[in-house]
Image: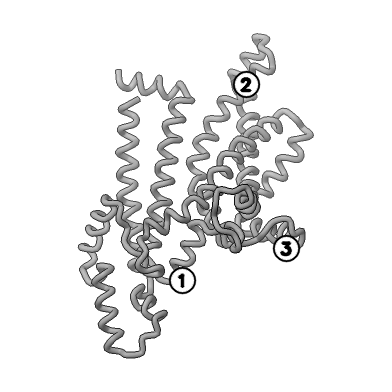
Amino acid sequence: MWRYIGRKLGIYGITFVVAVTINWMIPRFMPGDPVRSMLSRASVSDPEALERMTAYYNEVFGLDTPLHQQYFAFWAGLFRGDLGVSVWLYPEPVVDIILRHVPFTLGLLLPAIILSWIIGNRLGAFAARSKVLDNTVLPIGYILTATPYMWLALLLAWALGVVGGFFPTAGGYSFALTPSWTWGFFTNLVSHWFLPFLSMFVVALGGWAIGMRNMIIYELEADYSNYLQALGAPRRLIRRYAFRNAMLPQITGLAVQLGTIIAGALLTEVVFNYPGLGTLILNSLNNNDFFLLQGIFLFVVVGVLIANFIIDIVYVLVDPRTRVRMTGGAS
């Protein structure tokens, strides 16, 4: 087991270095000058003063050094927990800005991922043994899976927000309120959270339901199911074994789908102007703030890698066959 974990850590370590390097490269090769963009908002009319200020801020942000020195300086700052200073919100540190917006994104992602996975798998399992449910879950599931996150978010905002007036359609909470640990602020927070969460939950739900339904049917037709049935095993016992075996590909699928789900969350936040990392990415692009942009991408990359590593470990704990193979390989 420890050899397996060590091997996985090595693979994820290499992936992290490559991903962070690409993350560092992309903003720097994008068109636009972040310092010029920042100074354009200051409306400096004197050309000489503009040049002096440009040289000063290039030195402050470390943009006056060769690219290879910027790269090593980035890694040195990363190990210190320093991701630089935001150009758009100068002089606020990038880490502080990200930490202020991360709770909103995690508040959307974690409930949507966990609930859609659990409920979707249960619905798929029920659909595999019920023709009535199968005739409804399967077509609805295909429709939901093919629905883009942004399109569904716009539809829900129009139907339940604009037309119905049940939920607000923008922001993380009412601008008239000050964040506090009160019941009134919490209910207002939930009302703004519900539509972004619902759009992510509904799209992911269909995919998990279809996957589990197909896997259950496959497992019920497998040799071991037919053998248990020939021995006179109860149907309930056969279904339980089929469900446990069908869960294994779904765990793997969860790791594969994490990137798609996170991308959907970022798009959903833009639609609802939700104050998470998605809206922050859009503002960073509009203001050529690649220090903030690379900090956000770094957080997303690290989050996906950690989540995939945890899922890999859970898969080994859930499936005893992998432990047998590791033991056999070690011997």
Q: CA distance from mark 2 to mark 3?
A: 45 Å
User: Where 26 sits versus 17, above or below?
Assistant: below
Q: Earlier in the sequence, mark 1 or mark 3?
A: 3
Question: Which residue in the rendered view is the most extreme toward the top?
Answer: 231
Judge depth for marks 2 and 3 and give the one in front.
3
Helix, strand or loop at mark 2? helix
User: Can residue 200 be seen from the camera position used here?
Assistant: no
Identify the residue shown where x is 49% and y is 43%.
256
Is 178 on the left or on the right of 138, as rendered? left
Mark 1 vs 2: CB contact within 8 A: no
Residue receiving disc 3:
162
Q: Residue at x 41, y 56 (%)?
A: 297
Give the residue type at disc 3: Val
> Label for residue 286?
1
Residue drawn at 30 percent across, 38 percent down: 10
Amino acid type assigned to the residue bearing label 2 in the image: Arg
- Closer to the camera, 98 or 206? 98
Mark linked to residue 249 = none
Kind of residue at badge 1 = Asn
